[in-house]
Amino acid sequence: MPPINLRKATKMPLIGPVARVALKFFANREAGNISAHFAKYLRPRYAGTQELRETSFRMRHQVYCEELKFEPERASGMETDDFDPHSHHCVIEHKPSGNFAGTVRIVYSGSGNELLPIEKYCAEAISLAEHAPWDFPRGEICEISRLAVPDQFRRRQMDKFKGAATGVINEDSYSEAELRCFPFIAVGLYMAAASIALEQGINHCFVMMEPRLARSLRLVGIPFKQIGPVVDYHGERAPYYINRQVLLDSLPPGFKKLLKYVKDEISSQLGNAPINASKDPKSKASNVGKATSSVNFAI
């Protein structure tokens, strides 16, 4: 990995642009190794069974309810909401232990009645009208949300959610070679979400996330475009957008290799997956909700 002073140099005047190019080069070079480590230690799983979906919901409860206190704790120990019925869910499995290292969902829309979270709660945060979800066919949009990595799989400060208890992985349980994968678990989850979108013919993706996460994703070749101002919701977050072509054109070779591994794994599991069957693929939402102060989702 590149030295920390290079990361700091990206914020300096004059040499900042050069440092960012160098940092991206190092990240891409490391991605070739990360892809091999993913294949050895980690496996993306499409949560097409009730058992795997409940595993995802339990991880979300651990992170969003117990750790971050963003949502009230549930007696069931599972965090769910109204968007789950029109979502695809993915988890990442740690092969040697059988434990799960993270989860993400892809909320899709089958009609104007199935709004994305960003439409229902944060519509007023979107200021670039040409990138608003309601301006695209409903069957071509999705939102990535509820990304969660349990604290035992976060070993560095950059891998911790705000408010994590320790964020340090138990090195007695996991080898040093395995630890090299864990900083990229979140990236792997985004790759899993991208794989689902690519498989389902979804062209436009939205997400509410912290600007620093967007910068990190840009570093690895996932250049989400900010389409609205930063708002105060569980910290500073803003609406972001990316489309299929930008993603495929922007990923450097090392991360394309990682995407191929994840996509091949997900594709092999999608035989019995529910298809994003829009009742009217050309339809657009007729009644998009405005942002409210009571938001029921977070990345």
Image (cartoon, rainbow, N blue to C red):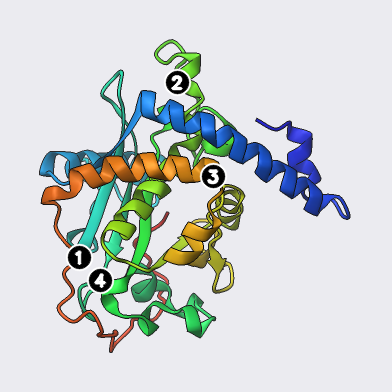
Q: CA distance from mark 4 to mark 1?
A: 8 Å
Q: Is residue 245 left or right of residue 92?
A: right
In this rendered view, identify the residue nearer to me: 180 or 161: 180
The 10 Å Cα crowd at callout 4, few under 14, some 14 to 19, many 20 or more, is: many
Q: Nearer the viewer, mark 4 or mark 1?
A: 1
- Residue highlighted by disc 3: 253
The disc, 1 or 2, on the residue closer to the chain's N-terminal end is: 2
Q: Position of residue 51 (x, y in %)?
A: 13, 39
139 w.r.t. 27: above or below: below
Amino acid type of the residue that numbered disc 3 sits on in the rendered structure: Pro
Q: Secondary structure at mark 3?
A: helix
Q: Earlier in the sequence, mark 3 or mark 1?
A: 3
Report the label total: 4
On the image, numbered disc 1 is attached to which residue?
276
Quadrant assignment, res 178: top left
**x and y percent of residue 284 in the render?**
29, 85
Q: From mark 3 to mark 1, how far is it between C-alphas?
A: 29 Å
Name the element at disc 4: loop
How far apart marks 4 and 2 lie (CA) works out to 37 Å
- What residue is rendered at 32% in x and 66% in y? 202
Residue type (three-letter) at the residue carrying disc 1: Asn
Residue at x 21% of width, y 78% of height: 111
**Amino acid on which the number 2 mark rests in the picture:** Glu
Q: Residue at x 19, y 43 (%)?
A: 269
> Label 2: which residue?
178
Q: Quadrant of the N terminus?
A: top right
